[in-house]
Image: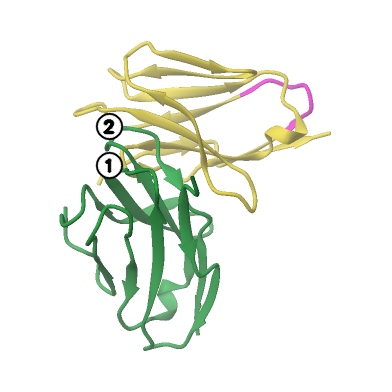
Chain colours: A green, B yellow
Amino acid sequence: NAGVTQTPKFHILKTGQSMTLQCAQDMNHGYMSWYRQDPGMGLRLIYYSAAAGTTDKEVPNGYNVSRLNTEDFPLRLVSAAPSQTSVYLCASSLLAYNEQFFGPGTRLTVL
Amino acid sequence: ILNVEQSPQSLHVQEGDSTNFTCSFPSSNFYALHWYRWETAKSPEALFVMTLNGDEKKKGRISATLNTKEGYSYLYIKGSQPEDSATYLCASRFYFGTGTSLTVIP
């Protein structure tokens, strides 16, 4: 099993550009989540999905998410801003209170 | 949003010292408390999942306790080694504390 995979590993965007961060898991986990990690801030939840086809809460401004199937959970930056410069981590878990398995992360810089 | 707090923010200890960190979390509607270890250039990895009040978990030299009534958990490392250097995160569901960065000095 590959576990949780993320692409790309690094990316540089200009302000106003859009891009999609990819996340996939092969463990048949129901829950998938996106976090951002900024210095001194720990891991901050962006969004989580409980199952394919479900949206559980409002998506924060500047981001779009979709969960068309169990395996994939892409995060789209609609119009990138420098404040979105961060390391983005994707994770999955079988249920909400089970341990999460993390991907290797995407380091994103917005100029 | 759940307010999960950790202390201290960072810690430097000598090899062989024992140390402990604190995680506090809302005690209402408690499901589970997770501890993760996050080493530099790697992804966070789960250490413990704790669900019951009074739970004690142990993995080698690392152990953790849980008090769900008062909303705190302790992580203990006995006889710290340089390879224990990492950031230790606790989480309640999808909400993480800011972590404790541990540096073990040889």
Location of residue B32 by image quarter: top left
Which residue type does callout 2 highlight? Pro
What residue sits right under mark 2 in the picture?
A: B26
Instruction: Please report the residue visible at 39 percent of the width from the left and 37 percent of the height from the top.
Output: B91
Residue situated in front as seen by the camera: A96 or B1? A96
Horizontal arrangement in the rendering, residue B52 relative to residue A3 (left or right): left
Question: Of B97 and B51, which appears nearest the observer?
Answer: B51
Q: Please name the residue shown 42% across and 23% down the image.
A: B73
Name which residue lies at 25% across and 47% down.
B1
Crowding at mark 1 (Cα within 10 Å: few <14, some 14-19, many 20+): few
Q: CA distance from mark 2 to mark 1?
A: 7 Å
Is A67 inside the magenta-drawn segment? no
**Lower position in the chain sequence, tag 2 or tag 1:** 1
Please determine whether, in this image, residue A11 is positioned above or below residue B40. below
Q: Observer-nearest residue: B43 or B53?
A: B43
Q: Residue at x 49, y 60 (%)?
A: A38
Helix, strand, or loop for circle 2?
Answer: loop
Callout 1: residue from which chain?
B
Label 1 is placed on what type of residue? Leu
Where B37 falls versus A33 (above or below)?
A: above
Classify the position of the C terminus of chain B by image quarter.
top right
In the rendered image, residue A46, in percent from the top left (x then y), is placed at: 32, 59
Q: Secondary structure at mark 1?
A: loop
Taking A11 as reference, is B41 left or right? Answer: right
- Residue tagged 1: B2
The answer to whether the residues at label 2 and label 1 have Cβ atoms under 8 Å apart is: yes
Q: Within 10 angstroms of label 2, few (less than 14), some, or many (20 or more) residues? A: some
Q: Quadrant of residue A36?
A: bottom left
Instruction: Residue B11: give x, y in percent of width and height.
Output: 65, 37
**Subunit that carries the residue with mark 2:** B
Mark number, residue A68 = none
Please report the bounds of the magenta region as a residue range.
B13-19
